[in-house]
Image (cartoon, rainbow, N blue to C red):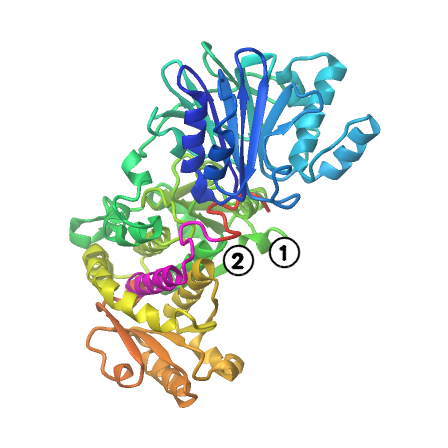
Amino acid sequence: MCGIVGYIGGGNVYDVLIKGLHRLEYRGYDSAGIALVNPSGTLNVYKAMGKVSNLENFCKDKNLDALAGIAHTRWATHGEPSDCNAHPHYSEDGNLALVHNGTIENYKLLKDALTQHGCRFHSETDTEVLVQLIEYIKVKNNCSLLDAVREALKQVVGAYAIAVVEKDHPNRIIAARKSSPLVIGIGDDEMFLASDATPFVEYTKECVYLKDEEVAIIERGEPLKLVTLENKEAKIDVTTLELSISQLEKGGYPHFMLKEIFEQTTTLKDCIRGRVVNGGKRIIISGVDDNKEKFLAAKRIVIVACGTSWHAALLGKYLIQDMCRIPVEVEYASEFRYSNPVLDDKDIVMAISQSGETADTLAAIKIAKRMGAFVYGISNVVGSSIPRETDSGTYIHVGPEIGVASTKAFTGQVMVLTMLAAAIAQLRGTMTQEQITEIGKAIQKVPSLVEKVLRLNEKIERLSLIYTYAHNFLYLGRGYSYPVALEGALKLKEISYIHAEGYPAAEMKHGPIALIDEEMPSVIIAPNDHLYEKIVNNVQQVKARSGSIIAIVTEGDTTIRNIADHVLEVPEVPEALSPIVTSIPLQLLSYYIAINKGKNVDMPRNLAKSVTVE
C-alpha cells in the first residue's frame, strides 16, 4: 500500500527520489520520508506528515548531497500517522536507515526480546523493530549488512518489501521482498528500486521483479546481484517494460480519474485486440487454449477477489454460468483464506486483482494451489505477483490506472471475463457458433458504444449539482445490473464520502424500502433485458414512497422515462455486455458529485490503490 523508491547512480539522488515519490502518490499514503547517504559518510533522514510536497518544503534548507538514497510514502498500519512513525527509520546507532512495506506479524515478540537486550524504540511501528533487529544481529555477529538482513528476515513472520542503506557503505543499497512488490530498474551506470515501475520508467525500460525471499545487492559500479535468504545465488530475469510516460500524466484532464474514464474507448480496444477474430466468429484466450483439459474437466469455478474486482467477479459468475453451464462461486479473498475452503483438482480458482499484488488474493491463491486446484489469474500489471503465482491467466491490458477509484480496470476485467466465458463455452460446446459470432461481433462494437455513452458527460455534470448534498444513496439493479449497482455505490462512497448501498432490486422490500423518502435518491440500473418488467415494478415502489429516481435505461425507453425524475440513456447491447455501458454513467456521476464537494478524487482519504497488507 505504501511506496518505496531507491536510487544509486550519477544523477541527482534527491531529485530522482522525490520525483519517484510523486509518481507513487496514487498508491495512498499519510506521510513521506527520505534517507540520503552523504559522500562524507553521514546518513540524513528527513520526514514529514502529509503530502510529498510537505517533505519537499521541509528539505529546502537541508543537506541533500548524496551518493545513494531511499524514500518512502507511508500508509499507517502500526502507529498513527506522525513524523515519528513515518519512514525511513534509523537503527539505534544511526548507522542504518530502512524503509518497509508490509506487516511484521511477530513484531511485538521481536520488540520485547530486543528491549531486554537494551534496544530503545522511538516509534510505534513494526518497521523500527526490523531495523533494530538488523543492527543487533550485525553488531552481535560482527557480520556484513547483507548477512544481517538475511538472518533478520529469517526471524520475521509476515510480509515485507524493504530497502536498507548504511552510512559506512554509501555506494550500496540492500533490498528484499516477501509478499509485497519490489522491482529494480537497471539503467546505464545507475539502478533504481521501487514498489512498481512508475518511478523509473522515464530512465530505463529494463527491470527485474524480485521474487519472494530474494535479497538484492545494488551497488554502484557493480552488476546487480540476487541471493536467497540462504545465501544461494538467484537467477536474474530482466523484463522490458511496456509502460510509457504519457500513461502516467493527466494529458490535459483535471484528474486522473476523469482521464481514465474517458480512456475506456481506447483501453477496451486494447483489451479486445487479438482476442476476437474472424469477424467475431472465434474468441481466443490463450490461457484457455493452453489449458483445454482443465477447462473441459472443470466441475466448479471459484472466483476470489476484493473490492471492485469482487464486483467484476460477481459478473463473471453470471457470465460463466450463462455461457458455460459451470457452477461458479464468488468469494471475498479476505474471507476465503479463513473459511477452511474445500477444493480439489477438478476445481478452477480464478483470482482477480488490478494490481496483481492484493495481499488477501495472493494468500487465497497459495491456499488453492496447496489444495490442488488449477489457479487462473486476471490482472492488469505485467510482472506482478499474481501472474507469477498462478498456473495461467489473462492480462486485461488497460494500462496503468493511477486514480485510486477503479474505472477502466473494472470495465477491462468485465470485458476479459466476457471473452473468457465465451472462449470456455466455445471449447465446451455450450454455445452454438451462431451465438459465439453474435457475442463476438457485439464485443467488437463496445468501444464505439462506450464513446457514445461518454457524450452524457455534460448532462451528468449538470445532474450532479442536484444531488451533491444528499446524505445517502440507494443503488438498485437486477441480474447483470446488480453487481453494477454495488460498483456504483462503492464509487460514490470512495470519492465523495456519501453513504451509499447497492442492493438487488427485489431485496428492497426486505428492509431498505424503510429508508426511502424524498431525501433518499435511488439510482436504478434498468437496461432493456429479460428482467426489465420486474425492475419497472421496483421503480414504481420507490416512486410511491416519494423517492427521487435516477434511472440508467436503454435508448428509446418510454416506461421508466415516465416514472423516473432523471433518465440517462445508454446504447442497446446484449445483456451480457450491459454492465460495461451502464457502469460508465455511474462513474461520471460519482466523479462530479465528489468534485462538487471539493474532494480529492484521485487520492481519497484513508484509501490505497494497491492493498498489499492484510
The answer to which quarter of the image holds residue 35 is: top right
From this viewpoint, is residue 57 visible?
A: yes
Marking on residue 331: 2
For residue 219, the mark is none
Alpha carbons under labels 2 and 1: distance apart: 10 Å
Q: Is residue 295 left or right of residue 154?
A: left
Element at label 2: strand
| Residue at image point 33% right, 55% down | 411
Reading the image, the residue beneath label 1 is 339
Percent coordinates x, y for residue 105 in the rendering:
68, 40
Helix, strand or loop for the magenta stretch, by majority: helix
**Foreground residue among 138 and 528:** 138
Q: Amino acid at mark 1?
A: Ser
Judge whether residue 538 is colored magenta: no
Q: Amino acid at mark 2?
A: Glu
Which residue is rendered at x = 37% and y = 87% of the image?
A: 540
Q: Residue at x 71, y 24 (%)?
A: 92
Relative image position of residue 8 (x, y in whole percent): 46, 18
**Residue 297 position in % (x across, y down):** 44, 51
Which residue is found at the position 29% from the left and 65% from the top?
Answer: 461
Q: Earlier in the sequence, mark 2 or mark 1?
A: 2
Residue 367's quadrant in the figure?
A: top right
In the image, residue 592 lies in the stretch drawn in magenta: yes
The residue stretch that appears in magenta: 578-604
Q: Would you place residue 609 above or below residue 183 in this image?
A: below
